[in-house]
Amino acid sequence: MFYLTLSKKGLWSGLLLLISLLLAGAAVIKMWDVPEKAAMAPVYHGSEAEKKISLTINVVWGEEYIPQILDILSENGVQATFFMGGQWVDDFPDLANKIAQNGHELGNHGYSHLHQERISKAANIEEIRKAETSIINVTGIKPELFAPPYGEKSDVILKAAEETGYTTIFWSIDTIDWQRPEPSVITERVLAGAHNGAIVLMHPTAPTVHSLPVVIKELKKQGYQLVKVSSLLEG
């Protein structure tokens, strides 16, 4: 009788152990089967329903042209979105403040203008946070939009931006003004690609300064309203 009692106990113990192992195995299988949630998709343009366009300027160099760009925007009653590198903000706090004081939108462009697809998510988060701190310390404004350096869009970058509370912004019209073409080339690229909800990518270069008044005049003539990216996304 004692032997049978032990056998029954052993049987139940074995069954419980087997059930536990099966449940644990099922949990592991489920964990491996469920794909990791994809990052929030980046934004390339706003609503096609409204005749609005955003001019964006990525700033990590070209500080000598910023005052002229600000004057042109002010003279034409246009507000743009400036994606600023944190290191640039640290180096040129007066210019960063002038951009903010003129009512333009401030965006995050990372701190060191690294190829962020080549670094870890943790390092990406650090780049974004460090730039954010610089912008806040200098201007008192916390940016909500992020433009990755070099237009890189790996999942690691997108997830880092999302986890730090940013909306990732790209563009639908690239002026490629960093190659410093003739101003007329920049103008033609913008006007040829103009569409409702367009986001135009620009940089502070001499050809950009010369083309900007013409771009603004012609877009307005076509009936476009030039707005900040955040305003573009509201429509």
Image (cartoon, rainbow, N blue to C red):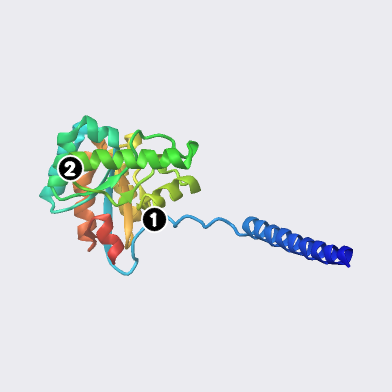
The residue pinned by badge 1 equals 44
Q: Position of residue 228 (x, y in %)?
A: 24, 55
Quarter occupied by the N terminus: bottom right
Residue at (26% x, 51% y) in the render: 55
Q: Would residue 177 be found to the left or right of residue 226 on screen?
A: right
Q: Residue 72: which quarter of the image?
A: top left
The mark that comes first in sequence, 1 or 2, is: 1
* Foreground of the two, 217 or 8: 8
Q: Position of residue 118 (x, y in %)?
A: 49, 36
Within 10 Å of disc 1 (Cα), the crowding (few <14, some 14-19, many 20+) is: some
Within 10 Å of disc 2 (Cα), the crowding (few <14, some 14-19, many 20+) is: some
Instruction: Residue at the far left: name it.
Output: 75
Which mark identifies residue 28?
Answer: none
Quarter occupied by the C terminus: bottom left
The residue pinned by badge 2 equals 139
Can the viewer see residue 73? yes
Q: Residue 67: which quarter of the image?
A: top left
Q: Position of residue 186 (x, y in %)?
A: 30, 44
* Foreground of the two, 211 or 162: 162
Secondary structure under tag 2 reads helix
Cα gap from disc 1 to disc 2, whole angstroms = 27 Å
Instruction: Residue at the far bottom: name it.
Output: 49
Residue at (20% x, 58% y) in the render: 220
Can the viewer see residue 210? no
Secondary structure under tag 1 reads loop
Amino acid beneath label 1: Tyr
